[in-house]
Image (tube, rainbow, N blue to C red):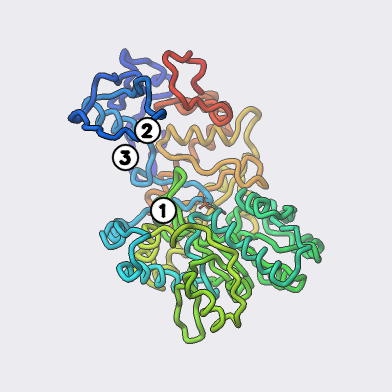
Amino acid sequence: MSVNQSGWRPERPSAADAGAATATGNRALMLEEPLIFEIGSTRTTGVDFADGDVRHDRLGDLTRKTPIGLPGLSEPETVRHYTRLSRQNYAIDLGLFPLGSCTMKHNPRLNERIARLPGFADVHPLQPVDTVQGALGVINQLAFWLIDLTGMHGVAMSPKAGAHGELCGVLCIKAALEARGDTERRVMLVPESAHGTNPATAAFAGFTVEDIPATAAGRVDLAALKARLGPDVAGVMITNPNTCGLFEPELKEISDAVHAAGGYVYCDGANFNAIVGRVRPGDLGIDAMHINLHKTFSTPHGGGGPGSGPVVLSEALSPYGPLPYTARTADGHIHLIEEERAQEFSDEHFGGKHDSFGRMTAFHGQMGMFTRALTYILSHGADGLRQVAEDAVLNANYVLRRLEDVLDAPFAASGPCMHEAIFSDAGFPDGFSTLDVAKGLIDEGFHPMTIYFPLVVHGAMLVEPTETESKATLDQFIDALRSVATRAKAGDPSLKAAPHFAPRRRLDETLAARKPVLVWKDKAPLADAAE
Ligand SMILES: *Cc1c(COP(=O)(O)O)cnc(C)c1O
């Protein structure tokens, strides 16, 4: 075992040692934890409730007739049960999360502190508007910065995730086409390397999705795109930087061509952290772009939420944005437009054109995300945000250059990458795959990178270090990945059985996804479990 650059590394047991079972199933201080159904009892509870004085039973026929059978534990047992389970989770507060396309960065504690101020955390969406002026002010100020940083005209703050933002932008495109009576444009062009949410969004909004091929250099094939434009094309959805971690230098030319052909340009802005403060999408001719506040501007995410995906809009699409929305007027003011003011505002600023496609959410969006994102923006300042992009790109290039001798880096020859480094499984011997490398990394203490995405790279490994990781952390990760990749290339059989040291070994992920066992059945045969 090599000693990494950060110095001392303790002796680790070999894979063979790990097979040695303990009497309890526990390993060192990692305790094997049964399900609560196996250890709890319906007779035990951590809390004593006085018998209720139920005078009016309004449930009628719906009253439960059999006991519910929920297992209980005493209070200390409950605390221990869930704490033990939580120790089997990996978390950004434990170490690097190199998941490409996810931007898993450290969340400054300052953001959390601000988000928890009662004036933000405890507001109710139905409170009278004059009691939430501060919260609305935060939304407006954030809207101002999002418009400013992207060089766009308006922003819909309410979408609740990147994918939701895509739907918002695509519905704006649809509304704009309908408003000009252009109803024959049914095709949305999406590059092969796009995130799966792009084609899903276009299809959900009623468009037919057609692929645009990628060039050998991992970019959109401009000639193929231009050749496909025509009176049936509503627009394109392009990610920039794209999911191969590469900047699309021809985006302005793409936008000009799409506009000339009567279409609109949607940009998937999930990777905005790589260009924030350096490039303004508005200057590239973008009509709509979502910003994942939970990626570019920190804020915790994962496990399905929470998220926030405001959509910045061009002047052409702003009149169709969902209510409520914010827009900048000629005097530089950003206005928060609610239903009551929409017509008046439209008459004044959109020549009466305002024709919102509707509402996407009941209220204004994710207050907790807004406060965190604005805190991130204000605490970094303009120079700090620029450095966010520069450091994110520097870190990814460091990973790329330090690993390209052991892992095939398909686009490394075409220059630096943006915020993520991509590798392929080329050169692995028969029987060894990207999955083996990911599982081997778990044994080395690292959450694996994104694997098998984007599809345009065979056996893809997409590493996004983000700007918040130090060189020391990156060196540890690089040493671990070097070691595992070298073992894969040498055909080390023990790698095929990794992870050896995790609480669970190799799961049948397909079976778990296709036939998840979601209901506990007493003494279910072990064969039902995914392992
Ligand atoms: C994360 C991501 C999305 C989806 O964003 P969600 O907030 O997860 O809905 C879309 N496109 C790209 C390129 C992404 O990385």
For label 3, the crowd category at 10 Å Cα-Cα, with few meaning under 14, some 14 to 19 and many 20 or more, is few
Question: What mark, if any, has residue 503 been given in the picture?
Answer: none
Q: CA distance from mark 1 to mark 3?
A: 26 Å
The x and y percentages for residue 148 are 48, 75
Q: Amino acid at mark 3?
A: Trp
Going from N to C along the chain, the mark reached first, 3 or 2, is: 3
Q: Which residue is mark 2?
A: 59
Q: Nearer the viewer, residue 42 or 451?
A: 42
| Front position among marks 1 and 3 | 1
Name the element at disc 1.
loop
Q: Which residue is mark 3?
A: 8
Q: Amino acid at mark 1?
A: Lys
The x and y percentages for residue 37 are 35, 21
Q: CA distance from mark 3 to mark 2?
A: 65 Å
Q: Which residue is mark 1?
A: 105
Q: Quadrant of residue 479?
A: top left
What's the residue at 59%, 74% (across, down)? 354
What's the residue at 76%, 64% (across, down)? 183
